[in-house]
Amino acid sequence: MFMNKILFLFVILLVFSCNREKILVYAWVSGPKGATDTELKDQFEDYKKKGIDVLMYSAGHNPKTYQRIGKIAKAQGLGFHAWIPTLIQKDNPKLDSTLYAINGLGESSLDKPAYVKYYKFLCPNRDEVYDFLAELYGHVADIPEVDGIHLDYIRFPDVILARGLWDKYELVMDKEYPQFDYCYCDTCVSDFMKQTGIDIRTIEEPSQLEEWKQFRYDLITSMVNRLSDMVHSKNKRITAAVFPGPNSIAKKIVRQEWDKWNIDAFLPMNYNDFYLEDTKWIGEMCKESVSLVDSSKQVYSGLFICPNPKNRANAPDPEDHGLLPEELEAAIRESMENGAAGICLFTPGRMTKEHWKVFKKAIYKNYTEKTNDL
Ligand SMILES: [Zn+2]
């Protein structure tokens, strides 16, 4: 009888602890857009209550802003990382115009950005670009309230756009076209020549040249790894928002060979709607990512939330698409059952009441083992 009671208590405890096990939730958040300290405190308190653990917070370049917001986030028990775009940089007196990437037609991304006005990408093959970024990230990483640096736009412009975006930009991207293909600046051309003996400007179909692809993967990898050493020397973490894959998408469309990056965690943007895919695809992407990166590094599955579920079917712009409340549980389950260490929401601000309801249940499930339940 006594043993039965003990056993009963043990089972209750086990069930309770399983139910309380929560998956790790990151969130991409921008601000503060004029919010007062009290408003930020209320916002972060609400996020924490809803189940968010860590903020990837984008607030420009000023370290003092990160200090102010980080202090409030920490007081609410949230992790706080500075999310700052890397190679996309608008005109800045610290950046010479010759540091911007050049496409296959010889046009600078500063004067003639691809697709959208803000697509002003720096060339990753320039020491001045590294120096600029090391100073920027270094000063932010020095702030005690900042747990880490989160890189974004650490890539080339999309040489091929995600399939779901072709209509929006009225393009058929059946192959690599020179106006979207970077970087053909003098430094890149001459370094590639030194390395391989090939003058890339004379090659008719550069997309067919494996060495030229690898050269550009390596430029991004080298920039990331230099930044990583710098951030790690300050005892801070470094992570990055990356395209899905890396093999199936990231390498092909933005030249991120991110399984070679020495950073602490990866947040692939598994935005299924951009690729005209369903939630099952999110699982496939997580599986690929986890199988390729070192087991000491985590993969957090980035999920794109639909801000206006009722209108999704009529919204022409994929930016207005994303996961509906009824898809969110499957997206989380697919991610977790395929090895993700957690998820990252893009964004809490896009979540509707119905999303939060589903979310609250889904984050407290135990996904450690795949079950065969139907
Ligand atoms: Zn270049």
Image (cartoon, grey):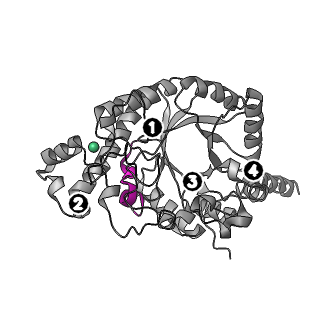
Locate residue 280 relative to residue 85 in the image: left or right: right
Q: Is residue 311 above or below residue 118?
A: below
Residue type for callout 2: Pro
Closer to the eye: label 1 or 4: 1
Residues at circles 1 and 4 in contact by the CB criterion of under 8 Å: no
What percent of the width, then of the height, locates residue 303? 60, 56
What percent of the width, then of the height, locates residue 201? 18, 54
Residue ID for mark 3: 302
Residue in view at x 75 percent, y 32 percent: 41
Q: Between disc 2 and disc 3, whose residue precedes?
A: 2
Residue type for callout 3: Gly
Residue type for callout 4: Arg
Residue ID for mark 1: 90
Q: Between disc 2 and disc 1, whose residue precedes?
A: 1
Residue in view at x 21 percent, y 61 percent: 209
Find out if the beta carbon at label 1 lies less than 8 Å from the nearest ligand 1 atom: no
Q: Between disc 1 and disc 4, whose residue precedes?
A: 4
Closer to the eye: label 2 or 4: 2
